[in-house]
Image (cartoon, rainbow, N blue to C red):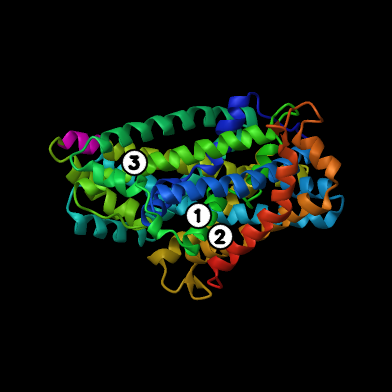
Amino acid sequence: MEKRGNFGTKLGVILATAGSAVGLGNIWRFPYMAGENGGAAFILIYIICILLFGLPGMVSEFIVGRHGAANAPRAYRIIGGHRAWSAVGIIGTITSMIILGFYAVVAGWCAQYLFASVFGELSGDASYVADYFKAFSTDPVKPTLWGIAFILLTHVVIQHGVRNGIEKVSNLLMPCLFVLLLVIAVASCLLPGASKGIDFLLKPDFSKVSGSVLLEALGQAFFSLSLGTACLCTYASYFTRQTNLMKSAAQIAGLDTIIAILAGLMIFPAAFSVGVNPDSGPSLIFITLPNVFQQAFGAVPVLGYVISILFYSLLVLAALTSTISMHEIGTAFFFEEFHITRSRGAWIETICCVVICIFCSLSMGGVEGLTLFGMPVLNFCDYFTAQILLPLGAFVTSILIGWCVSKETVRAEFTNWGTLNVSVFGISLFSIYLFAVRFICPACILAIALHQVGVI
């Protein structure tokens, strides 16, 4: 069997793993939630959630992955000491496969909009753009082909391996993504009336903070960091023994948060400069913003044209960094467990995801009545993974690391076998981490799950 790869540099570890977390949700979900839930107050609560819950959750999955140095199911089995624990990794592998299947559909929409921007097909008023999106998304052929193309593009990266594929591409894509985001954010903030959008995002409004907002911030921290997908576990299996897990988690979470805030500074100033209150969800990206960019930069049409191209290039890059990580989870599983070549493992994952992608794409209007439990297949896949599978995987991981694995094993991984100083002002970071993973993480995950299904 082929030898497993690993990341070659510390920068590669950070950029590749951060790329798995940075995705389309950073571009629209975080800014909108922050603006509607207290602005800077929400961001502050979000950062606290990252510290109390996000970082311990990330480190836990890192520990599982690096300790096992194998695909997710095998890594869970190794650290848990029993075959039954492999079920957690299997759930994560299935979850990532489903997510990649429907995520590729939305990524394909972004690719189409990049194509349309280049050829000037998005020029028109708001109703024209809305009709354009409806006609495209419900077409039975175009969005399906774009989704399949995106999965195949991901496949090409994965087939080149960890160091020559994932790491090299992440080292290129992540800086490009950051530069694009920064350029558009600066251009947006310089528009007339942009200060209203900046205030909307960054001005604290503690009157909007409620129990529901706290749970929304918890949920955003949970989903933004890719907890529960087995992605962090899989990537950590390629970490070297010298990788500082806690430091890496902090750097990745920090980069993820900075990108999310920059996305808000890109969207809201431009929207408010033309008097538009951005909607959430797909309508923001595919209906509202094309018209916003046209109006905001209308004085210099070529600038609006360029910004539109840069924006959809940004979305494609963000989507690709996420699809690469999700594809790798299944590829590693098939490659190692079936004792086949990495190339064949990647093809099995690709074929499975293409099938899911086709059904998800056609369910959006291409084929009438293509539903599961009364929902379009794409919406059901989104609900099933986000509301059930992700919280389940993260919850069981917290129980495993906090209560089932020996404290000595967890401490050894956390401290790199005693070679790291893991104390701040004389306080042991390991003790804080262990308390968080035993008590805070399970409680937070349970609260998120109950909130998502409407119980609290």
Residue 349 in the image: state x and y as whole percent. Answer: 62, 48
Identify which amino acid the numbered label 1 is placed on: Ala
The nearer-to-camera label among 3 and 2 is 3
Q: Earlier in the sequence, mark 3 or mark 2?
A: 3
Location of residue 129 (image quadrant): bottom left
Q: Is residue 452 above or below residue 81?
A: below
Location of residue 114 (image quadrant): top left
Identify which amino acid the numbered label 3 is placed on: Leu
Q: Secondary structure at mark 1?
A: helix
Mark 2 is surrounded, within 10 Å at the Cα level, by few (under 14), some (14 to 19) or many (20 or more) other residues, namely: many
Q: Which residue is nearer to you in this view: 416 or 171?
A: 416
Q: Which residue is nearer to you in this view: 391 or 339?
A: 391
Residue on which the image places disc 3? 265
Residue at point 62%, 49% (across, down): 53
Q: Which mark is residue 217?
A: 1
Identify which amino acid the numbered label 2 is placed on: Ala
Residue on which the image places disc 2? 386
In the rendered image, is residue 225 in sight?
no
Q: CA separation, marks 3 and 2?
A: 27 Å
Q: Is residue 9 above or below residue 174?
A: above
Mark 1 is surrounded, within 10 Å at the Cα level, by few (under 14), some (14 to 19) or many (20 or more) other residues, namely: many
Residue 250 in the image: state x and y as whole percent. Answer: 59, 36
Q: Is residue 119 above or below residue 241?
A: below
Q: Which residues are magenta?
A: 301-306
Q: Secondary structure at mark 3?
A: helix
